[in-house]
Image: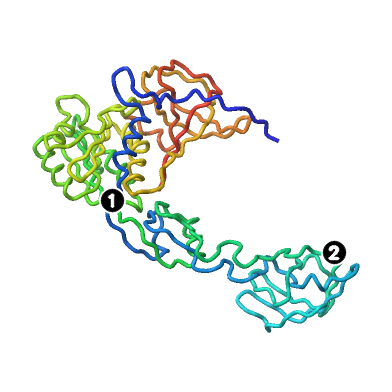
Amino acid sequence: MIPTQKFESLGCGCDTSEDPNGLPSIDTALERIASLCGRPIAGTETLPLGQAHGRVLAEAIHAQGATPPFDASAMDGYALSSKSLTGQGPWHLNIVDEVTAGSLGEGKSLSPGEASRIFTGAPLPHGADTVVMQERIERQGDRFRLDFRPLVGENVRKRGEDMSPGDIILSPGKRLGPREIAALAAAGADEVIVRRKLRVALIVTGNEIREPGTTLAAAEIRDVNTPMLQSALTDARISLIACHRTGDDPDKLRRLLDEMADASDLIVTTGGISVGDKDHVKPAMLELGADLWFSGVAIKPGKPVTLGKLRQSIWLGLPGNPVSALTTWTLFGQALLAHLCTEETPNHRKRHVVTSASLRCHASRCELRPARLVGFDGAGRELVTFDSATHSARVAGLPQADGFIFIPSGQDALPAGAVVEFLPFCEN
């Protein structure tokens, strides 16, 4: 038996309305995403059920008939009528038929004192209301002995006990995975109407970045963000229509952003959104007439993250450092994607975990630190371990992390055993 105790969470500080520098909190930013991006993208498509994994349902699905469509055996055994069991046992019954899954046997109605050999999934013969497991009888040729009185309906799947005709099985907005597709198949659906894919353009900026396989010159670094975000954007809801690496040329960048605004539903950029002289993405967006919905969030890492709209295209500006980009995509990009696809309101998958060791921090903003799940404590609570600090450009430890812990703003330290919030990485 596992003892339990009440969680006393410190909270992450992400619900504080503003930080001292005027930046919106994490929760405020998520609320703006929900309110400003809640209108669905226009358009649907019809897909065979087996090709609909990961897509978002656009129309409700109703059960076309009863499931199961007939009373069926839940076990291998013997079907009989409880009315045959008169008086005190034991009882001896004659085996007059055999019914396998997909067949009706000889279609006989059972008379008193008769039973049918039956297999899992086979329809019950007329007159039967009970199935006795084969392990619980003593068979002798075409007869068997029953030493106990089974319950009426025992080991029987009743017609319609799972679904009745017309039942709503799934409502619009449900993202389809194996569980949902199983239910739809049982309901009789062979194809579904889903939201069309979101057209996404990815633009990675920086004079210093070079694509994989390129020999690096002095002051150059390998491009991490392009393959990382290509992986993050490999999602059944997304059509990645363009992927560009570009330097810090303001005119070229402005032309590219202008072109992508007409071609995409969502533009994702990295870099160029801070306050440096070479940060040209946000100025280019403003020159093109973009509306900014927030510019910076009280979060570490990822403070410069920006959200806006240019004509009909939503723009999510991620920071250039890879850990910052991954953090803000996991937190804000996934929420944005769900709202644009009119998926059911996401809960961001956060849950409580317990720190396995003490930690120090010096953040005026809520910090998201990569963490690894390492088991459970004596109270059955999940334990996490983590590095001593968050480094926005260090990626070597990311493969060992399972997600992020939220370190409350304004905290200097947390003891071992502190309850914190945990957001797992979203793997598509």
Task: Give residue 184's position: percent from left, percent from top.
Answer: 47, 62
Q: Residue furthest left?
A: 251
Distance from disc 1 to disc 2, alpha carbons, whole Å, reads 62 Å
* Residue pointed to by mark 1: 41
Residue in front for this viewpoint, 91 or 217: 91
Mark nearer the N terminus (1 vs 2): 1
Q: Is residue 206 above or below residue 39?
A: above
* Residue pointed to by mark 2: 148
Q: Is residue 399 above or below residue 386?
A: below
Task: Give residue 161's position: percent from left, percent from top.
Answer: 61, 62
**How many residues crowd around disc 2 within 10 Å: few (fewer than 14), some, or many (20 or more)?**
some
Residue at (87% x, 66% y) in the render: 147
Badge number at residue 69:
none
- Please, what is the three-letter code of the amino acid marked with disc 2? Phe
Q: Is residue 91 left or right of residue 371?
A: right
Q: Secondary structure at mark 1?
A: loop
Residue at (67% x, 68% y) in the render: 73
Q: Give the number of callouts.
A: 2
- Please, what is the three-letter code of the amino acid marked with disc 1? Ile
Mark 1 or 2: in front is 1
Write down the quadrant of residue 308 in the picture: top left
